[in-house]
Amino acid sequence: MNLKNSATVKWSSEVSAYEILHSLPDAVFTTDRQMRINYFNLAASKITGFRPEEAIGMYCKDVLKTNTCETECHIKKALDANQNIFNIETVITTAWETNPTILINASLLSDSSGYVVGYLHVFRDISPLKKIMSDLEISRNDLAERNVELDRTLKELKSTQRQLLHAQKMESMGILAGGIAHDFNNILSGILGYASLLKLKIDTENPLYKYADTIEQSAVKASSLTQHLLTFSRGGTYKLEIMNVNRSIKATIDILDRTISKKIQIKKSLASDLWTVEADPSQIEQVLLNICINARDAMPNGGKITMTTENFHFTGREINYSHLGIKKGEYVKISISDTGEGIPLEIQNKIFDPFFTTKDADKGTGLGLSMAYGVIKTHEGHINMESTLGKGTTFEILLPMSDKIKEKRSSEADPKIAGGRETILLVDDEEVVRELGQEILEDKGYSVLLATDGLDGIEQYKKNKEIIDLIILDMIMPKMDGIETYKHLKKINPSLKILISSGYSHDSDDQEDLRIKAEGYLHKPYKIEELTKIVRQILDKRDS
């Protein structure tokens, strides 16, 4: 059937059906029962590349060239069964050898008597739509991957947030612990000092001597406790030296061999070429001992403690240490593992908290691991813990490698402690510390002036600068602290000798700089011989 030669269908303004079909955006063509094309509109021409006059008379399969035309045409099969067909998706080959994807519909064409004379085909190029759908699928997959990545990032952020909150809590607790320790040290200064004075003034055979000695020893033990608090707060004092950690481990093992149950084996694997570190050996040994004591308590029925050392180069890519904020560089790594009960996950973020303990009240203070944390942080190191219930716990410590050369210690004996006739200004806001210092120094023959704070100390010095030979200056005072007082006094007399004394030390650069410039540092609470020894050393140095 040729629509061009058939009777036209009247439409508005005499528009023929032929013109209407040629104007459709969808491709339309008709075929006879043998699938020879007898009509081909412009949209079909634009999609296939065949002009209407070329396509008319050709078989459908020679124009569309689909992958099913050579085998079995599903459209022809359906139409032969007097069935219309809808939305068949197929790929064609155009006259330009391109391969667009089309969506085709086909229906029967019947004459007025109902006889099927041919078929009507309508199709459209859905390649752009397929491209959009493909892009959407790619975008969906990409979005799914990004969601996974986002989920992982959120988990990491939450983990980092927990670690940050924990670090902030530890910092706050450190400040609190340091403040408590400072006040407690001032109290202990009076107890320890007066107990020592009392022992000097009574005979050893006197029954009261035993009481005074007990008070003194108890004060020393209490002082050790405050030192642990200061260590946690990173406000304690350290005697740094170039050291090999292996020696501290061997010393710790010697102590453990004599004190812990024989049911616990102690193994070591120490690097023979271990780098040196700059640290306080006694503090490092205390850290190792505290961790090992916790390991012992986790193995009531016996087990094994393993201590290892190795040189460790941190590149920044090691996952196990990514949350610790470690700088790239060389470290000495200490590992302490046990085969104990392990630490429950819900309390692992609390183990470095001061006073946190799972032990009975009479078996632990909860300061061991918090002290270890403070010591390692003060040494600019890092401490990490991993634990699995029923398998054990491992602590890993990283200390920065030092390339300094170890200095040889002098074998000269300490000079004999003596008194003198010099005048000393003692500046401290604690009355008991002032009175104790005055009594100790005057007992050694010195003249002592007292000041209650920094401002008072400056005024006292201005009035008596001709006779004052040494100032003992507290660091933490109201009105004007030790740092500002020191600066004012040095402006008045740059050659003035000043001995710094404190039970607490901040980590500020000014504080460290002051301790370097001062003639000496005396940590509270101090014993009589410690005070008189350093005072005499400074005064003798001045006179030399």
Image (cartoon, rainbow, N blue to C red):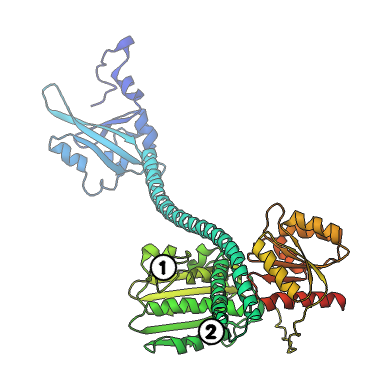
At x 33%, y 30%, the residue is 26
Q: Which residue is mark 1?
A: 357
Q: Which type of secondary structure does the marked residue at label 1 adopt? A: loop
Which residue is at the front of the view, 481 or 380?
A: 481
Residue 520 place in picture, x, y as percent: 75, 71
**Callout 1: few (<14), some (14-19), or many (20+) C-alpha neighbours within 10 Å?**
some
327 on left or right of 52: right
At x 49%, y 55%, the residue is 165
Mark 1 in CB contact with mark 2 (< 8 angstroms):
no
Residue type indicated by callout 2: Ile
> In the rendered image of this protein, does residue 233 appear above or below residue 527?
above
Which residue is at the front of the view, 350 or 345?
A: 350
**Residue 411 position by quadrant:** bottom right
**Residue 310 position by quadrant:** bottom right
**Callout 2: few (<14), some (14-19), or many (20+) C-alpha neighbours within 10 Å?**
many
Residue 174 in view, yes or no: yes
Q: Which residue is mark 2?
A: 249
Residue 292 place in picture, x, y as percent: 46, 79
